[in-house]
Image (cartoon, rainbow, N blue to C red):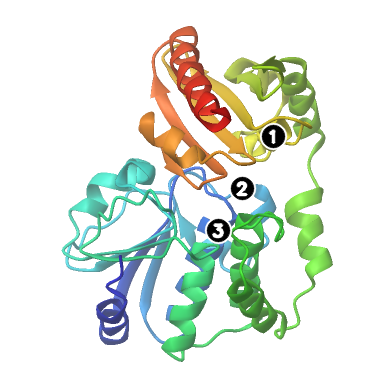
Amino acid sequence: MSDRSAILDIIKKEASFNLISHMLPDGDSIGSLLGMGKSLMLAGKNVKMYTPGHIPRKYSFLEGAELVNNEIIIEDQEITTIVLDSSDPDRLGIFKDAVMKSKTIINIDHHVTNQLFGTLNHVDSNASATGEIVYGILEDMDLEINEGIAEALYVAITTDTGSFKYDNTTPLTHQVVAELLRFGLSPGNLSQKIFDERPLSFYILLREALSSLEMYEDHAISVMTISKDIRERSGASTDELEGIVNYTRNIEGVELGILFYVESENEVKIGFRSKRLDVSVLAGKLNGGGHAKAAGCRMQGDFESVKARVMGEAFKMLHELQA
């Protein structure tokens, strides 16, 4: 779904924008937000940037990160709101109501599960990352890209492609990244910051997660569970949950990896990773969303009930694959 031409007209014409991305921000959400926001500022636009919650520490080095707010926004409903990398309004958290009251909502995303909630929508599920789409918009509008903007967009793309390991990496992805690297970026330094370097608390939390490992269906499904209490005892922040679910998929023979994070007695967050299964379908059945190989959802209820429902759907999907 693409209202791209109309979106470019609005960006060219209007002087003020609110930009916002989703809760539990990842590299693509933050990189897209900063890349577009900083470029519009250089074009003389009045731009305010928001995200529900705080920017994870490993992305705080990006230029402009200190400009991103996490307070309630949009007092002027006439200002156009650009929503980046969010498949549905619920992912906007505390900003949802304010955003949905905006006169014009521009929805820019690459998730196949996007609910097309914008007044105008530019959703390209073939794009490797929302950052890739943002780069195309900036280029087509001849908006300025400097080293800081290029770095933000590089982080957006490299994180959502798993450092170019995932199948969403395309020839266009590499072409875009080649152009970004012309700004003098250091792939080695950036990779170290966003993929390799973690605080000790992450590894303490990972140890707890690995100790909870359960295998099902002749080792085709692996499951790990972390509770809020365990996370807090480890000294880890919620940011440090990012990436742990990948360990479930990386076990040889596993088709589907699942991470349960028990937020409270009545709320559980679930992450899915797969090798061949389309877990966006699985997450969709549970009112979540995401990509074919990486998706997630949030469910209300006690852990045992939630786990039983999720595992029932997981078994069903695996059996369909094996049929």
First in residue order: circle 1 vs circle 3: 3
- Determine if residue 60 is in view: no
Q: Which mark is residue 56?
A: 2
User: Percent x, y for residue 42?
Assistant: 47, 84
Q: Are marks 2 and 3 in contact (CB under 8 Å)?
A: no
Under circle 2, the secondary element is loop
Q: Residue at x 46, y 41 (%)?
A: 280
Q: Quadrant of residue 118?
A: bottom left
Left or right for 127, reference 141: right
Q: Which mark is residue 28?
A: 3
Which callout, 2 or 3, points to the residue nearer the camera? 3
Q: CA distance from mark 1 to mark 2?
A: 23 Å
Q: Which mark is residue 249?
A: 1
In front here: 192 or 212?
Answer: 212
Under circle 3, the secondary element is helix
Q: Residue furthest front?
A: 323
Which callout, 1 or 3, points to the residue nearer the camera? 1
Which amino acid type corresponds to the residue marked 1 in the rendered image? Arg
